[in-house]
């Protein structure tokens, strides 16, 4: 037991979900009454919580496809969360073109990437039959163009995904491995609530503090990626 404990506590390489759960059990001193399924559910709860905190670069994906010449829309990716900035400048002194949001869909015309501005669905009536604009219809998982495309051009855009639920054999690879301990500490915080441990015995505050420290480190790491 001691050897396993030392290995898990010192581990900095990527862990599977099961290894994260094993480490969580060490932090609560094997006192949990949760079943295996409940522990996995608890992990996925805190995993989704961390992933939803901000647009981590690990959650960025690129969607590609071909425009329809019969429908003014294409399908959004099944794991689509929201659009990611993809039309900004590294120099923060430069303004965004036309003071619009830095989110566009690139329509590729004869090798040229033509930016189509993403607008709010509430403003779509202002751009009816106007080329160069599009908007997301989230309930129907569609990306609409304000002018029916006449040519089946290719398109692409960046988005932040909603990660899939993980199994015990998976690795939460969307978050860099050195930050995986955040899941251990957040699981321990929620575990104290679920088990209704007395505050003096739960170490919830200590685990929350450690989780906050790791989250801050992860946020700083992510901010450096955003400046590249």
Image: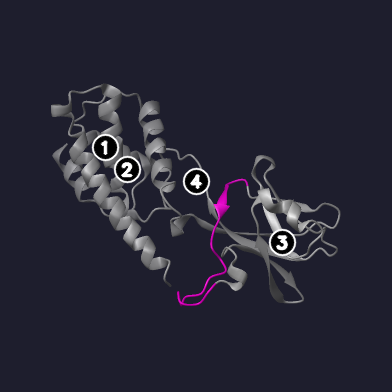
Q: Residue 39 at what x, y percent from top left?
A: 35, 30
In terms of secondary structure, where does tag 3 sit? strand
Q: Main secondary structure of the magenta part?
A: loop
Residue at numbered disc 3: 133
107 falls in the magenta region: no
**Contact? badges 2 and 1 (CB < 8 Å):** yes
Measure the alpha-carbon separation of dots 4 and 2.
15 Å
Choose between 147 and 185: the one closer to the eye: 147
Among the two numbered marks 4 and 1 on one chain, the one whose residue lies closer to the N terminus: 1
Measure the alpha-carbon separation of dots 3 and 1.
48 Å
Among the two numbered marks 2 and 1 on one chain, the one whose residue lies closer to the N terminus: 1
Give the number of the disc on residue 208: none
Residue found 55% across the figure and 58% down from its top: 61
Measure the alpha-carbon separation of dots 4 and 1.
21 Å
Q: Quadrant of residue 159?
A: bottom right
In terms of secondary structure, where does tag 4 sit? loop
Between marks 3 and 1 in the image, the one whose residue lies nearer the viewer: 3
- Rate crowding at label 2 as few (under 14), some (14 to 19) or many (20 or more) other CA atoms within 10 Å: many
Quadrant position of the N terminus in the picture:
top left
Q: Is residue 187 left or right of residue 154?
A: left
Q: For the magenta stretch, what is the residue range?
A: 78-95
82 falls in the magenta region: yes
Position above or below: 39 against 113: above
Choose between 213 and 101: the one closer to the eye: 101
Q: Residue 58 at what x, y percent from top left?
A: 45, 57
Residue at numbered disc 2: 183
Between marks 4 and 1 in the image, the one whose residue lies nearer the viewer: 4
Among the two numbered marks 3 and 1 on one chain, the one whose residue lies closer to the N terminus: 1
Choose between 92 and 110: the one closer to the eye: 92
Measure the alpha-carbon separation of dots 2 and 3.
40 Å
Among the two numbered marks 2 and 3 on one chain, the one whose residue lies closer to the N terminus: 3
Q: Residue 188 at what x, y percent from top left?
A: 26, 35
């Amino acid at each position: 037991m001691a050897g396993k404990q030392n290995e898990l506590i010192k581990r900095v390489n990527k862990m599977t979900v099961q290894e994260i759960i094993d480490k969580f059990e060490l932090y609560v001193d094997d006192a949990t009454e949760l079943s295996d399924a409940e522990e996995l559910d608890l992990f996925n709860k805190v995993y989704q919580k961390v992933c939803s905190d901000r647009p981590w670069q690990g959650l960025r994906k690129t969607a590609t496809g071909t425009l329809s010449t019969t429908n003014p829309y294409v399908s959004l990716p099944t794991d689509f969360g929201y659009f990611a900035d993809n039309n900004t400048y590294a120099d923060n002194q430069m303004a965004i073109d036309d003071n619009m949001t830095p989110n566009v869909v690139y329509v590729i015309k004869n090798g040229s990437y033509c930016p189509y501005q993403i607008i709010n669905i509430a403003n779509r009536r202002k751009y009816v039959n106007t080329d160069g604009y599009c908007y997301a219809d989230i309930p129907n998982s569609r990306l609409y163009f304000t002018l029916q495309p006449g040519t089946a051009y290719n398109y692409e855009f960046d988005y932040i995904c909603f990660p899939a639920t993980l199994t015990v054999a998976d690795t939460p690879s969307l978050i860099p491995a050195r930050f995986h301990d955040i899941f251990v500490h957040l699981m321990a915080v929620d575990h104290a609530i679920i088990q209704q441990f007395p505050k003096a015995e739960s170490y919830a505050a200590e685990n929350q503090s450690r989780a906050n420290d790791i989250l801050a480190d992860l946020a700083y790491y992510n901010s450096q990626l955003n400046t590249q």
